[in-house]
Structure formats: structure tokens, C-alpha cells
Image (cartoon, grey):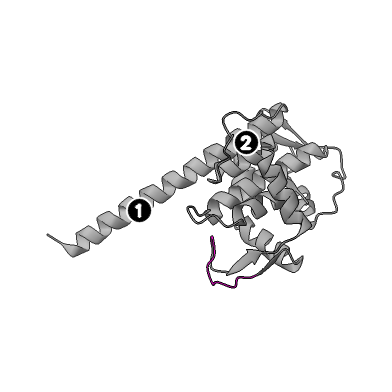
Amino acid sequence: MTTAKDLFIIAMDPQPDRSVGQGDLSLALAGAELIDLIGVGAVTVDGDRIVPGPPPPAPTEDRLLGEAAAALVDEAPYERVEDWLWRRGSDLASAYQATLEAEGQLAPRRDGRSPFGTERVELVDSAARRRALLRREADEPVLAALAAAVGVESEHAEDGPSPEDEAVTTVLAVVNDAVMELEAVRQRRSVEKAAFANLWRGP
């Protein structure tokens, strides 16, 4: 399993007091993929640019991570991390949901409720789910930071260790900025809709 799949599983784990937005999750999943690609030596981060390693990219058995590697911009001046998140993250949560369903990690919900999206699915009890939850409980720094970015807070988030890799720290910072930017867009649209509704409603 990859960091992105572990993140998706954590976001899907039932929590009655919160929900995870698909847009936020998609951005964080793209960041998780990039961090995994850094981990296998497929890319480096130079400033805010993603520099692919020598071709071919480091092989991976995970299809979605392989797609991410194949989607890298391999010509200078290369792609900015922020641009990668928005491009690769477009509807990425749906792609992970479909993949995990195909792998048998998700099944139709029995109670008809869904933590996000329109597809009513839930996690099955599996080794992958248990491993992801163990990583969360251990406050593994990268996964904890990504989970916090989408609103899945750890009880020990402030006391947990920070990632030691500078490139990973850069990606995590950009993920947080992108999620906050998306929230700002949501709020602006909400205000605009309210103003438009008031205009038509009249005095």
C-alpha cells in the first residue's frame, strides 16, 4: 500500500463528527503520491520545482503511483509542486475510490450513509485498513500531516515528530496552502451565492 491509499483509508474511516471534502482529499492524495515518488527516488524537489529522476522513473507495482510517475513533466523548467497538486489532484479521490473498490477494500454501505461523495461505500475489515490505522495511531509524521490537512486531526498532532526530509516538508507545506486556497474559494462562492439570492429576493 502507498501513503496515498493509507490516507484515503484514514479519511474514509467512520467519524460521525466530521466529513472530508473530496477536493481537499484529492489535493492531499496528489501530495502523498509525490512524497512516495520522492521516497523511491523517482523525483527530487529543487526549490518549488519537481525534477524527475533519470529515465525510466523508479518502478512501482502500484498502478496509480505508476500513473503519477508517468504524468511528471520531464522538461525544464519542470512543474511547480503547487501546479502538480492542482493538475494531478483533479478528481483524484474518485480514482482512488474506484481502485480500492476494485481491490475489495471498499464495499457498499449497509446503513446508506457516506462520509463524502455520492457513492455509498464503506471500508471492509482488511490488513490494509489495519495497517493504515496503525500508522495513524503511531502518528507517523507524513501521514499525520496529510491527514491533518484534510481535517482528520491526531490527538498528538502538535507533539508528533516532523518529517526530516526537506523535500517532503516542502510538499506538505504546499498541500496545506492548496487546501486553504480551496477553502477560500468555497467561502467566496458561498458569499457570492448568498448575495445573488438576496438580490433576487429583493427588499
Q: What stretch is highlighted in magenta?
A: 108-116
Q: Give the label on residue 76, or none.
A: none
Q: In the rendered view, would you say 170 is above or below 74?
A: above
Q: According to the image, label 2 marks what residue?
A: 172
Q: Distance between the residues labelled 2 and 1?
A: 27 Å
- Does the CB distance between marks 2 and 1 fall below 8 Å? no
- What's the residue type where badge 1 is placed? Ser
- What's the residue type where badge 2 is placed? Leu
Tag 1's secondary structure? helix
Instruction: Work out which quarter of the rendered image holds the C terminus and state it.
Output: bottom left
Q: In the rendered view, would you say 203 is above or below 88?
A: below
Q: Residue at image x 53%, y 45%?
A: 151
Q: Position of residue 98 (x, y in %)?
A: 68, 65
Crowdedness near tag 2: few (<14), some (14–19) or many (≥20) residues, C-alpha within 10 Å: many
Please identify the dominant SS of the magenta region. Answer: loop
Residue 198 in view: yes
Q: Give the label on residue 190, or none.
A: 1
Q: Residue at image x 83%, y 40%?
A: 40
Q: Position of residue 105 (x, y in %)?
A: 72, 63
Residue 112 within the segment the image draws in magenta: yes
Residue 180 within the segment the image draws in magenta: no
Q: Which of 106 and 170 is in front in this view?
A: 106
Q: Residue at image x 62%, y 38%?
A: 145
Q: In the rendered view, would you say 173 is above or below 100?
A: above
How many discs mark residues in the rendered view?
2
Tag 2's secondary structure? helix
